[in-house]
Amino acid sequence: MTVLRINGEDHDVDVPPDMPLLWVLRDVIGLTGTKFGCGIAQCGACTVHLAGKPVRSCQLPVSVIGGNEITTIEAIGGTPEGKRVQEAWLALDVVQCGYCQSGQIMSAAALLAQTPQPTDADIDAAMSGNICRCATYVRIREGIHQAASGRPLGLQVIVDGERP
Amino acid sequence: MSARDREPVDAGRRAALKLTGGGLAVAFLWSAGMGPAVATMSARRQASDAGAAAADGNPPFAPNAFIRIDSNGPVRLVMPSVEMGQAIYTGICMMLAEELGVGLDQIAVEHSPPSDELYGVVLLGGIQATGGSTSTRAQWQVLREAGAVAREMLVRAASLRWKVEPGDCTVARGVITHTPSGRTLPFGAVAEAAGKLPQPEKVTLKPRADYTLIGKPLRRVDSPDKVNGKTLFGIDIRVPGMKVAAVRTSPELAGRLGDVDERKARAIPGVVDVIRLDDAVAVVGEHYWAASQGLLALDITWQHGVNENLDNASLIRGLRAKSASGPVLVGRKATRDTPAAGTRVESEFVSPMLAHAPMEPLNATVHVTPGKCEIWTGSQVPTRCVAEAARICGIPAEGVTFHAQYLGGGFGRRLETDQVEQAVAFAKQVTYPLKVIWSREEDIRHDRVRPLYFDRIAATLGADGKPAAWHHRITSGTVLGRWAPGAMGKDGMDSDAIESAADLPYDLDNVQVEWARHDMPPGLVVGWWRGVGPTHNLFVVESFVDELAHAAGKDPLAYRQAMMKPGSRPRRVLDLAAEQIQWGTPLPPRVGRGIAVGSPFGSHVCLAMEVEVTPQGVVRLRRAVAAIDNGITINPSSVKAQIEGGVLFGLSAAMFSGITIEHGAIQQSNFHDYRILRINEAPAVEVHLVDSDEAPGGIGEVGTAIAAPALANAIFAATGIRLRELPVTRTSLVASKEAEDKVVSTGSGVEDLA
């Protein structure tokens, strides 16, 4: 039995030690918000936080995790950076198909935790491991700046009933 | 010229191209009236509606296939199209809600059940399909009307209860108000009564000035659950008792499965089964990790098929030979037979095969039981999935239950059913529900690729520098001929192959456009890829127009403007993009601007690009400025998002992508060798919308279709090097031997790699 601490809860899992965290999350525990995209740490869709740092869970064997806290997309809204990123993502309609966005948001939240006011170069460095096939990069960049500054940037989408 | 070449051009074809654009769409317009009537959506109740509503909780008010109103709770809207990122769910909700009189914060969306009768798209031959940038175009009238039908019935029910004139009632945010008395009733309170009323034969739609939703940048309805991991894509489905399969299909296209030694695989903990098809083997596990480890442990012998010696060079040789020998079909006939006098410019272009690589790898979950088959997947063609499953299981279609899911990208890949068919064929061999996931390697090696194209194009410039004669011959396989053979022209023409080549945005009359069909070998299946025919044709045509401008000694923008009517829709987007990128202002050395314009998918688009090419041949995308006239805009945020993403999708392909074949197998396999544009390589993209009262055009593929020529023209402006083959290769753009040596000596030859 391996004990994994995920989103503040302990999970006992009976899995091979070399099994990547991605498949433990998705197929054993049932947290399907973390996505499979490439299996070789090239696309970032599987990004989770391990002790607050972004890691590619498709290449992370459960045996190396130990007692480190794992945070997934399902709980990132509970952190201040994660919440701000999610809100900016909604205010700018960053999402298209949405499949990569779990990983994008996890990478963006980790960036803001480390670098509260990132430059474009910081964004390039932190986010270039996350592929978006819909290519929502223009709004991902804008969303990170908005989450960092707290100020509305670019085209703000509105909820029906609001004034634009 | 052969007798066949002299056949008159199908006037209906030209008219249809002008009317709609849209490679996938237009073909069906030509064939309209030639075959039996096709199924289509209706604003009113149809025969199949009762069953669909009953299966959907039997709401008291279900006036058509799109609206369900219960006594309590949100208004439920059923989505005729599928959501794969293009924001169509939001657009559909806005069209329905505008006339119905509810806010987007008062509705819940539902995936539709599979039904050509209820959700068929005339533009796509009556199939319930999402593709060809047709959704908004196909639904603009019917969905607003569907909303209005529902609204009138609800108002009628309220007015009968109050014994007042319906004309004295207004509707807003799900509430009916009798204006003189101030009385109100929510929709839910009159739903049951409204459900018993006859349906209005005629309804009045709002004039554009009265819109409260359409035209506003409203939030996507699907975003909230996509930012917290709650949205279920097909791959996320978990069914009780389900096992997971990893698959390998013969790497050699159309090769067969030989012997499989499964002993080592079976010894891996969690491996449950090893199952076979003629051309593939799957290992089933308790989870995907066990299955994929089991697959690696198999000792597989493959049997060669017809493609053992197939490679890319032989495919291109075949296309060249067919281009030279014909036969050709004429898509647009030149107005003059005599050769024009003047400067002749000739070019050849090669456009590569492309993989779709949607972020969600292909997958389907299937449970086959006696007489029944249940499927969970995200598909652009749900009814085709049902038909194929029924065929494979040998059961009637009624025995197939299809659970539609969100798509983690489509781009045309999910207009195919091959992966679902394979999953059904595997699941038929087991008793438990089976989720079949293709690895990224399987996804790329067994994509149904964008066709390989070879183009010869020539023009003779008159004294004014404009083409006095234009001759374009396209040679390729056909997607349409396989996907919808009934939609091919009477003469065998593939309308998609010539779209945006036969219908140029320029005032040129002496234009000959031909297509030579050259089918690919069995197993090398070509498919719809975002932007389809126009993505290829606009690259060739707009690169060539640039060549002509330079041959004529003209500025590429001025040259185009001189061939377009001032004030025309394509001219307006051309002028707008040029103005916004400040065309003509000075640039540093090795920085250039390029421009391209076209009218694909019923819209008009221009892209102006600014790029830098380093002496080492590395292309840096500095800026992209798009102008689009897509008719009436439903949601400006969605339109801009589609152009932003679409342009970058097209630039990604032009910069990095090409599927190549060796020994009959696709050589690329994952994102390390099938590169996708990353955020650090993406330019800023500005999108400028032209306000328009015209009917909506398509937007999903427009940005992609215009990207490559703008890039190639900008690279030419920066370097003087004309790219007639994609993708861009660094070595073709190196400034000098010294620059190349510098790359080698510093060891940074992979500067353009992420």
Image (cartoon, grey):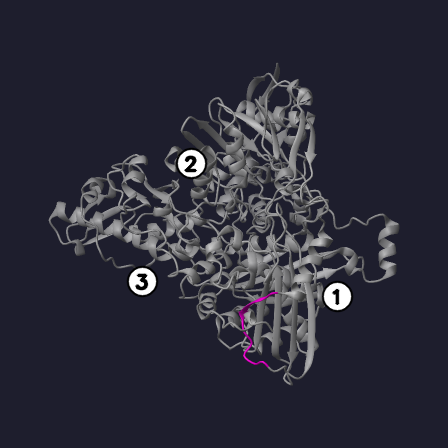
Residue B558 position (above or below residue B28): below
Q: Which mark is residue A32?
A: none
Marks 2 and 1 share the same chain: yes
**Pointer 2: what residue?**
B402
Tell me which segment is drawn in magenta: B327-337
Marks 1 and 3 share the same chain: yes
**Pointer 1: what residue?**
B721
Residue neighbourhood size for the residue with mark 2, other residues' Cα within 10 Å, grouped as few (<14), some (14–19), many (≥20): many
Q: How many marks?
A: 3
Label 2 to label 1, Cα distance in Å?
Answer: 52 Å
Quarter occupied by residue B564:
bottom right
Q: Residue at x 46, y 28 (%)?
A: B368
Image mark 1: chain? B
The extreme top residue here reads A1
Quarter occupied by residue B533:
bottom right
- Tag 3 or tag 1, which sits nearer the N-term? 3
Where in the figure is residue B562, as x and y percent of width and height? Answer: 58, 79
Give B394 or A92, whichever is nearer the viewer. B394
Where in the figure is residue A98, as x and y percent of width and height? Answer: 53, 42
Secondary structure under the numbered disc 1 in the rendered image? loop
Residue neighbourhood size for the residue with mark 3, other residues' Cα within 10 Å, grouped as few (<14), some (14–19), many (≥20): few
- Tag 1 or tag 2, which sits nearer the N-term? 2
The amino acid type found where label 1 is placed reads: Ile
Give B38 or B286, whichever is nearer the viewer. B38
